[in-house]
């Protein structure tokens, strides 16, 4: 794979270079991203309460691998490759379900929820078969913020994954340190008010870059800039060197809703400098966390191809708010509608950008203006993580 790249600095000291167009369209680059990023880092895959009782399972995809995430009777939440250890058929063929055991539909190899092989035709005639060794192949699992996070690094749960406290918790809490802490929002105790899934015809990096900057906000987000006027100036909540800036609501704005009207019951433990403010951070490689005084919005991205990404967005509220919605005492529709519109506007922009990544006019990349310079940090991380080495077969995809 040879990718042309920009060697010379851009004219004008205000501008920084971007990756080349091929970084967003090349299948081999995408394959390397799946192998070296998504299959080696911690990925947030689903809410823990989506599998609330023993036997409930859901199928998820991380990188190129299909996984089963199941709540067991003895070991809490576990995750396995969705591959029968006999001849490799998918064990779970649906998207979700509930079962006492997990059974392959090909030759009826049957696994306990805890993973070990418990039954198979003629298994008693094979006493030398190690039922743990031939159990479902596990992956690493952690729970945080009320979500299940998995890591495929090492290929099974006996190999050491990247340190979760350093890679995920450390980065997030360091960035939120200037605003007391993300812990103040009590995200792990919130309940799902709404979830929406978006099928976006764009490369995952375009979506991350869009989320990190607000240079586009005045152009495509009229509702958002009405609620947070400073966004119209092009400065995002995410800044250079990992700074997370709390963006203030407008003077006459009562809540983070589509029309600026009052929201619902505020989260009780937020600090004074978190009130009437919006914060947002990216948790590499595939999570966005957005916090406001009365709810939290979390995006999870699942890249499907070099030009397609599934994004799942959850709106989380206090349990009493969700109970009140069911009883007609609370209405969260205006809260949900604001960021739903933001999502649609952002994803349309990304989809209109994706075709140009293949254009000869963008072959050598584009430019970042000063309010976007922090995106260069993401590009540097991406480049160094992939560690594409220049050789006769492969040129390094460079940011500048």
Image: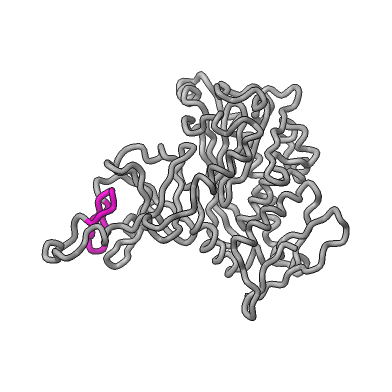
Q: Which picture quadrant has residue 262?
A: top right
Q: Position of residue 270 (x, y in %)?
A: 59, 25
Q: Residue 135 versus residue 342: which sits nearer the camera?
A: 135
Q: Nearer the viewer, residue 328 or 339?
A: 339
In this view, the residue farthest toward the top is 329
Which part of the image, by quadrant, shows the C terminus?
bottom right
The secondary structure that most of the magenta stretch takes on is loop
Q: Is residue 233 left or right of residue 92?
A: right
Percent position (x, y) of residue 347? 64, 49
Q: Is residue 292 above or below residue 239?
A: above
Q: What residue sits 43% from the left and 55% below the top?
A: 160
Looking at this view, is 392 or 87 the one in front?
392
Seen in the picture, residue 81 relative to 269 is either above or below; the reply is: below
Magenta stretch in the rendered image: 102-117
Q: Please say whether residue 271 is one of the residues in the magenta stretch.
A: no
- Residue 96 shows up from this direction: no
Say whether residue 110 is magenta.
Answer: yes
- Residue drawn 62% across and 36% down? 176
Q: Residue at x 72, y 49 (%)?
A: 374
| Residue 139 picture quarter | bottom left
Q: Position of residue 198 (x, y in %)?
A: 56, 48
Residue 283 falls left or right of residue 215: left
Q: Residue furthest left?
A: 125
């Amino acid at each position: 794979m040879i990718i042309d790249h920009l060697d010379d600095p851009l004219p004008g000291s205000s501008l920084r270079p971007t990756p080349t167009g091929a970084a967003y369209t090349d299948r081999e680059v995408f394959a390397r991203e799946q192998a070296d990023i998504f299959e080696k880092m911690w990925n947030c895959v689903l809410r823990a309460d989506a599998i609330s009782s023993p036997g409930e399972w859901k199928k998820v995809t991380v990188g190129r691998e299909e996984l089963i995430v199941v709540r067991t009777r003895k070991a809490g939440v576990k995750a396995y490759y969705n591959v029968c250890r006999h001849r490799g058929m998918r064990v779970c063929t649906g998207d979700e379900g509930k079962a006492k055991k997990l059974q392959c539909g090909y030759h009826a190899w049957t696994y306990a929820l805890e993973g070990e092989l418990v039954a198979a035709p003629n298994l008693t005639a094979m006493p030398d078969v190690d039922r743990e060794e031939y159990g479902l192949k596990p992956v690493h699992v952690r729970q945080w913020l009320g979500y299940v996070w998995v890591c495929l690094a090492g290929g099974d749960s006996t190999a050491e994954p990247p340190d979760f406290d350093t890679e995920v918790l450390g980065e997030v809490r360091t960035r939120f340190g200037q605003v007391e802490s993300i812990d103040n929002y009590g995200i792990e105790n919130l309940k799902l008010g709404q979830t929406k899934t978006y099928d976006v015809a764009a490369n995952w990096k375009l979506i991350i870059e869009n989320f990190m900057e607000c240079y586009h906000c005045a152009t495509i987000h009229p509702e958002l800039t009405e609620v947070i006027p400073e966004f119209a100036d092009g400065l995002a909540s995410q800044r250079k060197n990992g700074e997370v800036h709390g963006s203030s609501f407008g003077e006459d704005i009562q809540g983070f809703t589509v029309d600026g009207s009052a929201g619902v019951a505020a989260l009780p433990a937020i600090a004074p400098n978190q009130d009437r403010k919006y914060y947002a951070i990216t948790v590499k490689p595939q999570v966005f966390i957005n916090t406001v005084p009365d709810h939290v919005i979390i995006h999870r991205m699942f890249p499907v191809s070099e030009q397609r990404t599934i994004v799942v967005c959850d709106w989380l509220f206090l349990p009493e708010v969700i109970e009140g919605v069911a009883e007609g005492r609370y209405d969260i529709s205006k809260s949900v509608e604001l960021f739903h519109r933001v999502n649609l506007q952002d994803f349309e922009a990304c989809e209109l950008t994706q075709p140009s990544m293949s254009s000869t006019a963008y072959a050598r990349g584009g430019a970042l203006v000063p309010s976007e310079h922090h995106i260069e940090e993401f590009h540097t991380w991406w480049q160094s993580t992939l560690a594409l080495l220049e050789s006769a077969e492969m040129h390094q995809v460079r940011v500048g």
